[in-house]
Image (spheres, rainbow, N blue to C red):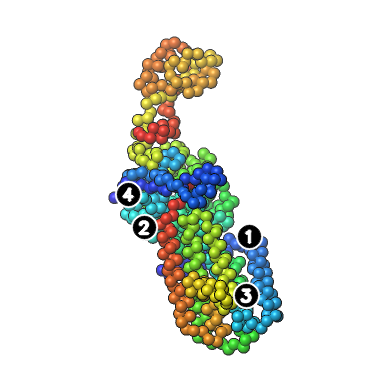
């Protein structure tokens, strides 16, 4: 049975259209114009137990709105969903005990108190037995490497340490589903990698299902085999990450280092030059034409080094966002 | 179930105290300001009673009991609910309300009881001291039933005030910025500060009647204070105060839940 089952979920917001200037503001006191903004449009998908699924889309695409409907925070305009067998927006306690939502841009721990106090309060709210709570807390602080930091006031922790504490708080009641909204936003690369590793290990150990939104493709590449892509509120892709590469990777990046101090002037005739620095040139070439182009270059010039790579994933995803379809 | 909520409230109260003690200076200043406020209130009324023997049929001792009752009630409301209700609009506007809705616990309880403002706790004690002194001056003899009725009516008054606060707070979901409507609370506290009998005359009497029966905010302190120091309390008035508290609390819960259905959550 799927952990998440969304059928035709839609959310439309009625948004006040403020007119410009003082006159517009005065007019707005008496007569207001509203516009319907479709944040999520007929989105359907299922997620099976234990999956880690990336939820991708540009800003304002509808990712967070979908996540909030699945968490039961907002009501959909139409459509239906079941999460862990419950209708999320009915917000039954039995449902809320079984999942967690972490938002990278928001803090849910008590700011002026040590994280340990927030964890204790969490224990009370979720009615966790003391022995279970102690064991889970010990396991999580070990996993995230923050055992010595739990008695420090939250406001004195670094952003990365704070996010680890947020994740620990979210996992204390051993949820079956973890909804993560940009959990690594603003973190340095080391903190990002640590959190990715912790999430991967936790998923492997506990089989928790994860739905993750992130603008960092490194998170997605590190964690998700499957991705959902949403643009303008519509789900435009549901499949493997490799599938996007197959479909959008119709170009290759060919990096050449020519002999001498400079690259040939006519190198642009072989493909689109994406970078050029002294004798090193990177060309974007159609996948099918790569052998032909390389043969032509090697015939004409002496080349010291060659490498052929896929374009970066974020560039491919950006293409999906721009085109709105896969 | 009830025990779980009681335990949780004590935990919230404990962590609130820990949080406040982390900023000791602010905590002590707040207590000092509250003491100053009480001192001025007492001095002001003492000065008035130097010029007259009664205000709207309340003699000085009765009136000081009323002030003690008002002060204790205000302290209780401020300590338990006011700060939480004041912050609600910010929670809605910032989207931080999300985290309260995710917890497997009654949202109204968590939102309206999450923080206990311990710096207002001395107000309850001081109110009780003033009430005790006023009773001693009156020559009151201890009556268990009378005290029992007073405590029930005091609790009803607190519930009534909580209900009104919750209704004002819930409007934040629709209005987003809710300071203007929340100003109404300060009007309400002004009305709670005086005995209803002072509303006399062609304009004042209907106003007093309106805030006694239609929006019954004046019941909050008037009824419990009367039962202790005014000889004749009509039984229907006590029943009416309890019934009003039940109706307003039930209505406020209904409105709060309706408000949550319209919660849009802020964009992240």
Q: Quadrant of the C terminus of chain A?
A: top left
Q: Residue at x 50, y 23 (%)?
A: A275
Q: Residues within 10 Å of mark 4 (few under 14, many from 20)?
A: some
**Residue A206 % position (x, y):** 38, 50
| Residue wearing tag 1 | B23
Secondary structure type for disc 4: strand
- Disc 2/disc 1 C-alpha distance (Å): 39 Å
Q: Judge whether A302 appears above or below A34 on screen.
A: above
**Residue A36 % position (x, y):** 40, 45
Q: How many marks?
A: 4
Mark 4 or 3: the one toward you: 4
Q: Residue at x 67, y 69 (%)?
A: B36
Secondary structure type for disc 2: helix
- Disc 4/disc 3 C-alpha distance (Å): 57 Å
Q: Residue at x 60, y 80 (%)?
A: B56
**Residue A234 % position (x, y):** 36, 40
| Subunit of label 4 | A
Q: Give whichever of B229, B123 is nearer the camera.
A: B229
| Residue wearing tag 3 | B126
| Subunit of label 1 | B
Q: Judge whether B199 appears above or below A84 on screen.
A: below
Residue A79 numbered tag: 4
Check if mark 4 and mark 1 are on a common chain.
no
Check if mark 4 and mark 2 are on a common chain.
yes
């Amino acid at each position: 049975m799927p952990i998440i089952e969304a059928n035709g979920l839609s959310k439309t917001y009625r948004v006040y259209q403020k007119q410009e200037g003082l006159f517009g503001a005065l007019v707005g006191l008496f007569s207001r114009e509203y516009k319907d903004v479709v944040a999520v449009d007929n989105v359907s998908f299922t997620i099976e137990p234990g999956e880690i699924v990336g939820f991708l889309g540009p800003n304002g695409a509808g990712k967070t709105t979908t996540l909030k409907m699945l968490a039961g925070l907002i009501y959909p305009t139409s459509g239906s969903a079941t999460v862990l067998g419950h209708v999320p927006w009915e917000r039954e306690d039995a449902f809320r005990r079984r999942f967690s939502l972490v938002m990278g841009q928001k803090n849910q721990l008590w700011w002026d108190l040590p994280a340990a106090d927030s964890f204790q309060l969490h224990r009370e709210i979720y009615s966790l037995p003391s022995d279970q709570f102690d064991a889970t807390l010990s396991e999580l602080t070990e996993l995230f490497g923050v055992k010595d930091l739990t008695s420090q006031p939250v406001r004195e922790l670094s952003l990365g340490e704070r996010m680890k504490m947020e994740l620990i708080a979210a996992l204390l009641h051993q949820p079956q589903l973890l909804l993560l909204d940009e959990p690594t936003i603003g973190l340095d690369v080391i903190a990002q990698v640590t959190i990715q590793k912790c999430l991967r290990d936790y998923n492997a150990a506990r089989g928790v299902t994860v739905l993750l939104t992130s603008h960092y493709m490194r998170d997605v590449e590190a964690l998700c085999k499957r991705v959902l892509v949403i643009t303008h509120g519509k789900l435009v892709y549901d499949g493997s990450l490799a599938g996007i590469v197959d479909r959008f990777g119709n170009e290759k990046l060919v990096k050449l280092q020519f002999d001498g101090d400079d690259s040939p002037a006519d190198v642009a005739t072989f493909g689109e030059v994406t970078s050029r620095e002294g004798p090193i040139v990177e060309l974007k070439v159609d996948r099918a034409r790569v052998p032909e182009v390389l043969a032509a270059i090697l015939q004409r010039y002496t080349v010291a080094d060659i490498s052929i790579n896929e374009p970066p994933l974020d560039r491919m995803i950006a293409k999906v966002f721009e085109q709105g379809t896969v | 179930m009830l025990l779980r909520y009681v335990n949780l409230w004590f935990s919230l109260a404990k962590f609130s105290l820990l949080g406040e003690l982390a900023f000791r200076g602010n905590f002590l200043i707040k207590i000092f300001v509250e003491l100053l406020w009480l001192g001025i209130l007492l001095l002001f009324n003492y000065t008035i009673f130097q010029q007259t023997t009664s205000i709207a049929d309340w003699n000085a001792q009765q009136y000081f009991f009323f002030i003690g009752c008002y002060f204790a009630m205000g302290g209780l409301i401020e300590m338990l609910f006011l700060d939480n209700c004041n912050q609600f609009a910010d929670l809605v506007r910032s989207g931080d309300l999300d985290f309260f809705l995710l917890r497997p616990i009654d949202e109204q309880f968590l939102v309206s009881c999450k923080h206990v403002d311990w710096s207002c706790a001395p107000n309850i004690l001081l109110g009780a001291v003033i009430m005790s002194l006023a009773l001693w001056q009156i020559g009151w003899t201890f009556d268990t039933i009378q005290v029992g009725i007073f405590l029930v009516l005091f609790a009803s008054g607190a519930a009534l005030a909580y209900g009104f606060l919750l209704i004002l707070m819930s409007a934040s979901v629709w209005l987003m910025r809710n300071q203007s409507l929340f100003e109404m609370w300060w009007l309400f506290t002004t009305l709670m500060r005086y005995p209803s009998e002072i509303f006399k005359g062609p304009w004042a009497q209907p106003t007093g009647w309106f805030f006694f029966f239609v929006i019954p905010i004046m019941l909050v302190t008037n009824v419990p204070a009367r039962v202790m120091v005014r000889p004749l309390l009509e039984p229907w008035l006590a029943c009416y105060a309890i019934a009003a508290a039940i109706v307003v609390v039930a209505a406020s819960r209904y409105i709060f839940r309706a408000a949550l259905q319209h919660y849009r959550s802020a964009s992240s």
